[in-house]
Amino acid sequence: MNNLKAFLPYIRKYRREFLLGIFSLIVADCMTLVVPWLIKEFVDLLPQKPAVESLLKYVLFLFLISLVLVVGRYGWRKYMFGLSRKIEFDILNDLFSHLLSLDRLWYQKQKTGNIMSRATNDLRAVREFFGLGILILIDAVFVIVMAVTMMVWINIELTLKVFIPLPIVSILFFSFVKEIGKRHEAVQEHLSKITEHVQENLSGIRVLHAFVQEENEKDKFKKLNQEYIQKNLRVTQVFGVFTPTMVFAIGIAGMISLWMGGRAVIADDITLGSFVAFNGYLMLLSWPMMGIGYVFNLTQKGLVGMSRVNEIFLAKSSIEDKGGDYTPASKGDLKISGIRFKYPDEAQEALKEIDLTISCGQTLGIVGVIGSGKTTLAKLLLRFYDPDSGDIWIDGKSIQEMPLKGLRDYIGYVSQEPFLFSTSIRNNIALGRENESDSEIERIVEIAGMASDLESFPDHLETMIGEKGVTLSGGQKQRIALARALFKKPPLLILDDSFSNLDSDMEEELLRNLKIHFKDTTKIIISHRLSTILNADNIIVMENGSISEQGNHSQLVKSGGIYASLFQSQELAREMEIIL
């Protein structure tokens, strides 16, 4: 029920439509309930051999009831089903906004397919509950209460006898309620697994083709689907007992009504019209009784869906955003003091006592072996994670006190594996800054070394690049990602091994362009290739999360440490390549 409470504000937002839908439903049900009574009056009138005008009066009444039924049914379909679609729309928007606010720690524990399943399959179950489920529930309760009331009004003794088999339905209902909930949850969780499997296979389709794993993955998918069918059959098995038993109970009630009611008519205890009306109301109970089983199914699916969607809503980012409109001064001064950091569930610290100062316009080079903490330091600057101790200041202001939007807009970041969206090159570079002129985009493209590549593309900047830039080479992806970072004109630029797929000539051209066009931008360049950072103002060598060496290129080569050894190895490798 707590999960249901979390979604009540969405109903309150559309309470007018909700009330209109219920009103239309009740009007339609009232018209339906009038029909058996009208037939009762008509049948009781026949022995008196009434005039044609009297009979036409009942025909007219039935026609008017039919018209009101049409309007009422149109009303509840429009307002109740329309309401559920609007609620789904609002929940989906809020869910997407919330997903964008969650941090990397949360996403590292999730699977994309599972999140997609919750946002589609589970949300659909929630929509069906708020639309069809609530509709059938209100319809069933109202019709049952009113029909039973009318049956009691006609003959209370006959009503009590007819309801003798109905407690069986109640016993079955309360016996199965928990079990059906568990089985529905198992079905929806397994559907998430199927979604995860499909998403993972489509993302890695080139790997599957390269290793000829198509048949193996088909078998896995077939097995998952068989398990899904089995789990659905377990739900069906419960309803295979519940629904037929309910129909059987209603059938027994009808048999009792015909037998006992027929004898009452013969004994003149009730009129023939009353007997017809009584059985009419009994038949009206058939759909609500069947509907209870259906709405029970929708309710269990809906509650499970609400629970799974609400788990996302309850998730909180570990990064506290101060909010506000503060934006750092556009200098680029950076100070890192006493930073220590350990990833969750990791035994060793990723960073240990990092102290650095970088002035506006300077370039810091960071080198080190894999796992030494280079990329982790970049992530802390962007507040993808917060340090366990120590702090980082930009232009004299702690980044903990800055709004995340302002901080991340201040920094241009190009990661090791750049992500490109399935849209045009222009949109990937602009990324939300749609009002910029073409000349500015083309200037940035020139700086990023992509001008000659664009000339070979059929639609120039409007060329569609496919999902994750599948139509581009690794070097082209990196240069478009660099152009995207430069386009925002950041005071601080972080390049995390961003030239790894470029040849040495292109690398030198890009570094020269950055020095000319972004001379006032503070740059942090992380690289395995020392040629990328030779001209950096300061270079640090990271080892096991600590700074083991620091200085410019000349100083570090002379010191004869790790940097000097790496430089000699890479120079030797370059000479060998030239010779070969």
Image (tube, rainbow, N blue to C red):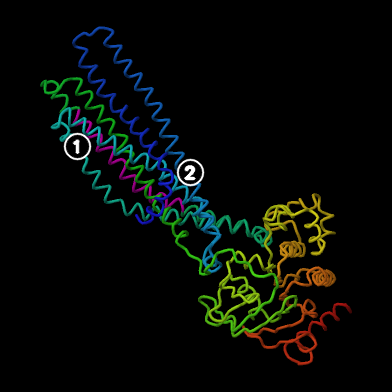
Tell me the CA gap for discs 1 and 2. 40 Å
Q: How many marks?
A: 2
Q: Give the SS element for disc 2.
A: helix
Q: Nearer the viewer, residue 389 or 131?
A: 389
Left or right, 261 with respect to 212, comes to left
Q: Residue at x 59, y 63 (%)?
A: 325
Q: Which residues are magenta?
A: 228-257
Left or right, 82 with respect to 442, comes to left
Local packing at callout 1 (Cα closer than 10 Å; few below 14, some 14-19, many 20+) is: some
Q: Residue at x 71, y 62 (%)?
A: 488
Image location (x, y in percent) of residue 314: 44, 61
Q: Residue furthest top?
A: 51
Confirm or deny contact between disc 1 and disc 2 (CB under 8 A).
Answer: no
Image location (x, y in percent) of residue 427: 71, 54
Mark with earlier residue (1, 2)? 2
Q: Nearer the viewer, residue 175 or 120?
A: 120
Which three-letter amino acid code belongs to the residue tagged 1?
Answer: Phe
Image location (x, y in percent) of residue 560: 76, 92
Residue linked to disc 2: 86
Looking at the picture, does residue 487 appear above or below residue 77?
Answer: below
Q: Is residue 23 magenta?
A: no
Which three-letter amino acid code belongs to the residue tagged 2?
Answer: Lys
